[in-house]
Amino acid sequence: MSAVHPTVGLSDHGHGHAGHHEIGFVGKYIFSKDHKVIGIQFLITTLLMLMVGGALALGVRFQLAWPWRAMPLVSQLTGGLFAAEGGQISPEFYTMLFTMHASVMIFLVIIPILAGAFGNFLIPLMIGADDMAFPTLNMLSYWFMWPAIACFGMSFTVNGLNAAPANGWTAYPVLSAVVQAAPGAGDAQTWWLFGLTLVGVSSMMGSVNYMTTIINMRAPGMTLFRMPLTIWSMFITAILQAFALPVLTAAGFMLVAERTLGFKFFVPGNLLINDAPATVGGGQPLLWQHLFWFYSHPAVYIMLLPAMGMVSDMLAAQVRKPIFGYKPMVYSMAAIAGLGFIVWGHHMFTSGMNPALGMTFMISTMMIALPSAVKVFNWIGTIWGGKVQFNTVTLNCVAFVSMFIVGGLSGIFMAAVPVDIYFHDTYFIVAHFHYVLFGATLFGCFGAIQFWYPKMFGRMMSERLGKLHFLLSFIGFNGTFFPMHLLGIAGFPRRYADPYIHPYMEHLMPINRFITLCAILMGIAQFILLFNFAFSFFAGKKAGRNPWNANGLEWSAPSPPGHGNFDVPPVCYRGPYEYSSPLSEGTDFLMQTDPLRHTGGVGNAGDGHH
Amino acid sequence: MNKFWPFFFMFWPFVAVVLFFIAPSMGWWFPSEAFSPLGVQIDNLFYLILVIVSVTFVGTHIGLGYALWKGVDNKAEKGWFSHGSHSLEVLWSIAPAGILMFISLYQLDVWRTYRVKSAYPKDLYGVAEVTARQFEWRIRYPAPGKKLQPTPQPDDLYTVNDLHVPVNQPVLIRLRSMDVQHSFFVPALRVKQDAVPGTVIPVWFEASKEGGFDLTCAELCGWGHYKMRGRVFAERKTEFEKYLNTLKAEQGFDGVNKPSESGAEIAKTE
Amino acid sequence: MKSFRRLATCIALVIAAGCQSERAPQFASSQQTQGLVKVAQDAVNAELEAGFGSPSQLAAWTALPVDFGTFSGTVTQVNGSTLGLELVPESPLAFKRRAGLLRGSAVLVASGANPAGVLRAESYNVDGKTLSVIGDKGAAVSDVAKVGDKVTVVGDTLQYGRDLYLRHCVHCHGVSGDGNGPTAKYFAIKPRDYRRGIFKFTSTKPTVRASHDDLFRIVKLGIPGTYMPSFMLLADEEVKAMVEYIRWLAMRGEMEGKLVVEMNNDFSQKAAKDRAIAEVNQEFENFRKTELAGKVEGAVGELKEDWEASDAEDNLVVPGAERVASTAESIERGRKLFLGDKGKCFSCHGEKGRGNGASTEDFNDIPGGEPGKKSDVPGLFDVWGNIVKPRDLTSGIYRGGRRPVDIYRRISAGIKGTPMQAFGTTLKDDEIWDLTNYVMSLPFEKKPKSEAKH
Amino acid sequence: MSHSGTVAAQPPVKMGLAIPNSKLCMWLFLGTEIMFFTAFIGTYLVLRLGSPGWPSDVADTHINVRAGGVNTFVLIFSSYLVVLAHESMLKHQFQKAWKLMCAVLFFGVVFLGIKSMEYKGKFDHDIVPGHIAENDAQALQKLVNEFSKSRDAMTNALITDDPKSEKKLSPAQKLVGLPQLISSESDTTKKDALKALGELRDATAQLKEGVRKDTLVLHTGTDHEVNPDITTKLEKFRTNEHTARYFTAHDPHPMVYGNVFASVYFLMTGFHAIHVIVGMILWIFPILRGAKLDASYTDWVENSGLYWHFVDLVWIFLFPLIYIVEFGSHAV
């Protein structure tokens, strides 16, 4: 088999060896079964949803900074469209805002941008497959997103255009199970649950597909420990998704049945709600919390691990160094995933659970900080002694590490049960999970967009705009979320429409105004990203096959890869991080596809044995 | 200019730490010192973790920044070709593990006192039943001199949002919910416990200072979640008894024998 | 750097847009008003606007028995549109809290013996003791106020109440107090519509309005069993201001209602259906010129009388005798009364007091509807047209309070606006107390065996 | 992978497991399915162990152990046939495989048939989530409601609105004029029917009053027999030719924690039944090939077989859990 050094010899816009099928526009770009198109579809959809979720968040922030003032834009849309009188919002509208913000961000942005967009685009390319194992299933996984989006949107429009689920994204019963308990949540909550189920179906289809592809469709020579960390993280994420998500889906079915068909699972008897007859049945509200967090805690890692993997890949390429401790990185991700299944109870320390159970969950939660710490040290170790080039990708990756440190460390407060008693459901926790989910994951994604954009569209994104976007995002982000730690310490609870009616929080209004201004800054910064994304598609500098001089298999394919991905069936000879290898001559990288005819002593160090 | 970014990443943790230092003087800190023995322990634990975390935070960022600083400067033709170090991995697995285990074990005692029934203080005084509902706290005291019963009694005393407890005395409340899930949160006493519908959860706490402390709801309970402001008044035993007697007189008022009409007596604030 | 400046401009623009887009809340016309012909509607709205203003620019109709809140002072200097002011009496603390709320308050200026004019307050600087004002309808400040004049600022309590109301109450009770705020539509039990001036749980005689204390108590303690929460979180001073605003809103609603009643016969759209509109307009013009002022005056007089009466000592329902001890005998007597013909309590509250009496199944009159016309659905109606369930007395939830005197008053004076009648005239004091004792014992009756879980 | 470090040896062409993608995917999918049913089973255990008292008396729950047992056997046997079908496919005995698959489909139908008979038994006794009275008071209230509903249905059917009047009358308003209607009616059958309606109305009113005044008891005697007054009434209207059509009241039947029980019962068996149906749809594809069935369907048969075994396995968990196991009269 002949392998050709990818930077020479072949045209940049080759079509794959699988040849052409004549497929029309619809087949090629809309109902496409090509993993790359599906990945890009996911990416664009999630970026749009990011803006929607961000707008909802700004609504929340506006109310906290200027309570009961007419919201910009929203108040223009009144006249019955939103629950508002005289331009001011009503408290249940506030609950809808934060509920939908969380739902959109978690289910329609973070999860699909990682697994859906990057997972789809990168997995076959990085393992040297021509497509996913089941392209049709893959297409369906994307097209199940839209009914889900429609259901979420529907939940905003049923009940007379001014209702949405108002129970928080956690949808704790009894509030979410008894229709009379939460204003506006009538049909909306049920639609929301349908949307949740559809997202679940989409993710489930994706995850079994990813697992099959990664297990069975690797290129020759791509052993498990030669897989890039991105692939490892996607694999572990897929496992988490496949085995945690069904539990939430099951719980969702139960809640729908409870709301609509009179089934009884979560509502205890003899509750008096909104003058309705006393409830019957012997359900248990905590049951939902257990089922919900059994999924939603692993989901936190679903929302993080792929970013960790991608950052590892990007960081190694940008600092021109092998990743420090490849196998510990893999094992720590596996450990995070494994432990992730047994820590869900730490969301419920104040729920009155058995104290012994609390201790168990507390220790397992503490232990999950350990692999996270190992990963952080390994990233720093990777940077150590490298040749750092500060482009947008590096900046976002370093921001990822930095933000992840903050998010991880603030998690220790919550893991310590007695301290969590105080911090539970305050802004401290809001700060914590935004540092992990936004700070870490989204900065990782921003980097990844910049890094793999040339592979997606064959053009580079603008560095200047990228850096501006990074700087504004970073400042806006920290200005928004860092002060929230202080709010949390001051006992500022989550989900309060008007916290200032409590005198002990009155003096926190200025800090909230500052936060809101920073949030607006951050929101504006995202338009730069969108602009850069669209602008570079037409005007970006043309990228060759391997603009970053990176090692992975995907860089040996044309940019953008044609149908079937590789013009030369790739063969993998080594691990993915052989940067600055003494074996490479004249360059500081050694691609996985490079058969390397010279002899040398160090050999397969890239397999990660050390 | 190349040094700007390492500096940028090293600089912001210092801003963060400085912010934490000035926060107390700006009033952005705990609403008050913890006025309960358990609360003091919780605070101490918080400060301990804060110190550990801050050192780690600053340390890792200095490491990160320094690595970047050196990396930008790296004049070598290639980077340092290293796949890692086994001993370093072991070191930085064991060190955090030790610290984390220390934190876990160190706090167990507080948690035990807070939640494990057998570790509750001996002289717990069952003060009232607090029933959370959308969007207020309904409180039921036993008649003066009587014990709190699990079911309502004809001579029970009722009020709303104002919970009076004797100071320097571990007290127990029975926490219930009439409709959805709520959470009983007194920031100044560092007490928080969810009120789960269908169950009665005993909560104990001890206020070590006289005064009124804010009581809020910390679990989303519907549109009026933010409205659930109550107060916990800790007062001397005699005053507490006097309050119960006032309440009793007020509650037994038949329009003839007691002149007070405005409700101002039980509706007292500040 | 340039981009930063641009960004700052952007943020400023967004915020400015936010401020400009603020739509001031408006009072809504009642349905009855909307049933009038256009000119009549306009006249009603004009009268209301003149007397009560709008939510953002309240008017203090001093003829009404409302404590609008006043502060007096002497002008020490006039500097453009700013008056130096020496407050009498000096009560800085209370004033400080409300100083920011002065915008729009009427500033009455008295020069010597004769009132010189009216200014509008803009803001008050507590430390500098200066009051910023603007002249009414563009008049120059210095023409109106001179050094040494006595100045009275009217309406700060009302505005304080308004601000609290717009923060705490409006999303259920609505801007005009019609009980129809955005959140209200989700409630099984509708928030009170103040516009009839009727409040359910009072300490006053059956025909009398609610007293200050009653409203204070309800706001402060909430109504158990409904979505009306306790506002114990507010200070007494705040609740008092809020109550004042609620009374004012009620009076506004009543005034509207009274005016509509005056015009309804001749100038409703229904009455004018078959007539030429010009003719009706002409007729209304005559009415407006000749009669309207008198009608308004009459309405004000009635309002004043009604609302002043509500606070009169002798309109309070005071039991004529002490509570009869709650003995088994008393309870038994109460039970007999409950089931007897004299009170017929059981007909609504049910034989076991569960609120499921036979009349809840009957077709009853709708109050205010055509006389003798029964409703289509079974049940008891209140004057607002909602079905009301008689209280389940075994639940231990008492909406109007659980003191013996509260129960006494419910029985003696009834619940206003609902089918719960006043029995003060038919039952003797002792009998009411027996009934009270029986009612209060109901939650503690041993549950019948059939209800215990087996 | 080698450690020699010279020219890298050509790696094997096929990486991963030596099974087809589809089979691997099916296994993984079954893994997710296991978690799905684990959630249900967990819910069941939590609710059952967390409830002081659980309806386990067959007389209450109308659980049909025998039907469940037969169904277990049906599924196990069909699983065996699936194995045979796959064997035949491998041996290229396609017609034999086709017959076996038809048999599997048939047993699927049998399973669902028995299942729906069980469901019907539940519906007949109104053992439906949200409908079950948990104590005597609720049972009586439910009885009253059912009587009223039957009465209203019958009223609406017998007494039509006056076509001239625009207004629609409610059943209760119509009933006001019943005596006149009876006296003016000439058709004897109609007259009898109206009289029966009158009786039903009176019986309903009586029951209602009994409940209101708390004079009506559901259970009498030491053994808690149902009040004969109630049973005779029920019997009367069920057998009366005029009322039977409209009469929908069930025997009053309080069941502590009955709603939760019925919820988990229908949830678990319902989702299992959905899985059986999906499995049957999977079998339909090769069966439709008929005589054209060929080796290209071997993988399909194998994967569907895996799924079918899984469905079988789930039932083997559900059957003892729901039908047989007693957790003791008072679990924690």
Image (tube, coloured by chain):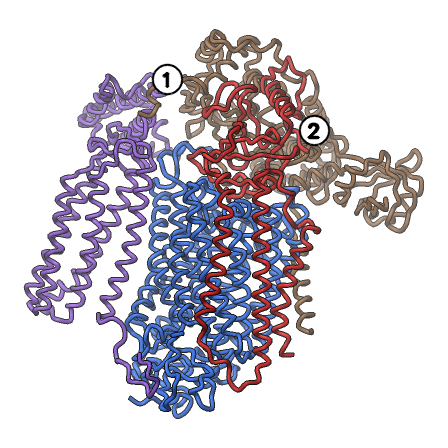
Chain colours: A blue, B red, C brown, D purple
- Would you say the residues marked 1 and 2 are in contact, meaning their CB atoms lie under 8 Å apart? no
Residue C8 is left or right of residue B227, and the answer is right
The N terminus of chain D lies in quadrant = bottom left
As helix, strand or loop, the secondary structure at mark 1 comes to loop
Q: Which residue is mark 1?
A: D213
The correct choice, above or below, for C429 with respect to C449 in the image is above
Residue A37 visible here = no
Query: x, y percentage for residue B61?
Result: 58, 66
Report the disc number at residue C299: 2
**Camera-side residue of D73 and A41:** D73
Which three-letter amino acid code belongs to the residue tagged 1? Lys
Q: Chain of mark 2?
A: C
**Camera-side residue of D22 and C339:** D22
The C terminus of chain D lies in quadrant = top left
Which three-letter amino acid code belongs to the residue tagged 2? Ala
At a point 50% along the width and 47% down the height, the residue shown is A417
Q: Are marks 1 and 2 on the same chain?
A: no
Q: Quadrant of residue C93?
A: top right
Q: Residues within 10 Å of mark 1 (few under 14, many from 20)?
A: some
Q: Quadrant of residue D224?
A: top left
Query: x, y percentage for residue C10?
Result: 66, 66
At a point 66% along the width and 58% down the height, the residue shown is B19
